[in-house]
């Protein structure tokens, strides 16, 4: 999107054009902008100046920019125009402003796709203007827009953004595909975040779920087995010896879901399943933590997670996992367990079956 200074630099000529489409197009073109960018900036900064929560800050900054006179026309974008490329890096993270970020990047080729979406509207402007639309930027801010996408096709090795009419004008193409090679754990996490961003616009290719992952050189066998003791249902990953032997996971964290109706309420079982899946995606995408097993008694399900993270970083992952789910009756505890005594005892119980 245009900066406030860029918007101010063509404000008077555009107003003088008086709605003449040809003149407006010529003005924008001479500055390296599109009409869609002008309209987006106009809507954006007008809304900000009218927002009482803004306190007149944008209006004063706009006036200051106007007083400096027309700023030099920026050069057209120097980075490549949007087109298909291979991303050498895929990053999924939260910014310091609690904005969900997803980046597909090829630094050598100066190509990228950056996606941004906040979890909650912080003011009327975000609620009324952004209104849940993902901000997408491709290679250069000259090719960026809130929304502009009609469909997203995601698979384990590529993502394709198909643009609507406004997006086609801004991006100067019908679609862009980024190919990539990432481990399956990061892909699971990426899928979850893309679902948050694009919801029913997202189409995910049906692919078989892997039983083995390799993350940063570490293998994870994702086989689960279940068994029952006299009063407890248990599910465990029986093949985690290699992770134990790394010595990296010295802390065990207990995440307890406490309820007197466990196993009796279909909605609660559905929530538990989603919570477990989300928790695994959030803590395991880089294998800094691993869920080893969980136990279910009459009034509690306890997840046993071995972690290399400090308490603060681990809880950030937990908050990330559960923030879009209903509030749940959760308790957290844990401590040192470098020898994986909890896991070993559970595994011995399984072998006795």
Image: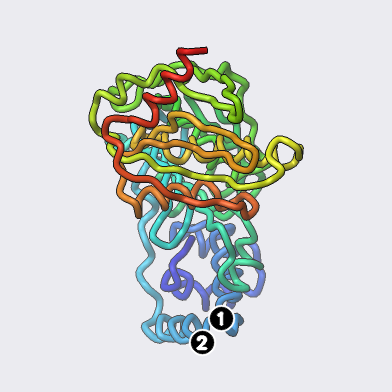
Name the element at disc 1.
helix
Of labels 2 and 1, earlier in sequence is 1
The x, y position of residue 83, in whole percent, is 46, 34
Residue drawn at the location 54% of the way across and 73% of the way down:
45
The residue that label 1 is drawn on is: 49
Tell me how far mark 2 sits from mark 1, CA to CA: 6 Å
Furthest-front residue in view? 230
Residue drawn at the location 48% of the way across and 36% of the way down:
281
Badge 1: few (under 14), some or many (20 or more) residues near its Cα, within 10 Å? Answer: some
The residue that label 2 is drawn on is: 56
**Up-down relation of residue 58 to residue 177 (above or below):** below
The answer to whether mark 2 and mark 1 are in CB contact below 8 A is yes
The x, y position of residue 76, in whole percent, is 39, 53
The x, y position of residue 103, in whole percent, is 42, 42
**Relative horizontal placement of residue 288, taking residue 53 as reference (left or right):** left
Foreground pick, 139 / 319 = 319
How was this image coloured? rainbow
Residue 144 at least partly seen: no
Residue 18 at least partly seen: yes
**Relative horizontal placement of residue 92, taking residue 88 as reference (left or right):** right
Residue drawn at the location 61% of the way across and 82% of the way down:
50
Q: Quadrant of residue 226?
A: top right
């Amino acid at each position: 999107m245009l900066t406030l200074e860029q918007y101010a630099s063509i404000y008077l000529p555009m107003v003088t054009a008086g709605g003449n489409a040809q003149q407006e197009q010529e003005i924008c073109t001479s500055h390296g902008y599109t009409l869609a960018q002008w309209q987006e900036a106009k809507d954006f900064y007008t809304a900000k100046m009218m927002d009482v929560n803004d306190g007149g800050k944008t209006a004063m900054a706009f006036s200051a920019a106007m007083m400096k006179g027309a700023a030099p026309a920026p050069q057209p974008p120097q980075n490549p125009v949007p087109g298909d490329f291979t991303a050498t890096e895929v990053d999924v993270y939260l910014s310091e402003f609690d904005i969900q970020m997803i980046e597909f990047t090829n630094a050598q080729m100066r190509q990228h796709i950056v996606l941004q979406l906040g979890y909650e509207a912080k003011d009327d402007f975000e609620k009324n203007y952004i209104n849940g639309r993902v901000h997408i930027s491709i290679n250069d801010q000259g090719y960026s827009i809130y929304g502009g996408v009609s469909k997203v096709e995601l698979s384990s090795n590529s993502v394709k953004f198909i643009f609507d009419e406004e997006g086609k004008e801004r991006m100067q193409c019908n679609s862009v595909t980024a190919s990539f090679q990432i481990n399956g754990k990061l892909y699971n996490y990426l899928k979850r975040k893309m679902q948050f961003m694009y919801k029913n616009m997202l189409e995910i290719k049906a692919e078989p779920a892997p039983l083995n992952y390799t993350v940063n050189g570490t293998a994870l066998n994702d086989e689960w087995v279940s068994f029952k003791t006299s009063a407890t249902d248990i599910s465990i990953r029986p093949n985690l010896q290699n992770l134990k032997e790394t010595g990296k996971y010295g802390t065990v964290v207990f995440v307890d879901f406490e309820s007197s109706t466990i196993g009796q309420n279909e909605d609660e079982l559905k929530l538990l399943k989603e919570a477990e899946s989300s928790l695994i995606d959030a803590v395991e995408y880089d294998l800094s933590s691993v869920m080893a097993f969980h136990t279910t008694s009459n009034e509690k399900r306890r997840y046993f997670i071995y972690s290399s993270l400090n308490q603060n970083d681990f809880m950030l992952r937990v908050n990330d996992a559960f923030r879009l789910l209903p509030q749940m009756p959760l308790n957290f505890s844990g401590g040192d367990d470098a020898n994986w005594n909890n896991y070993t005892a559970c595994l011995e119980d399984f072998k006795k079956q």
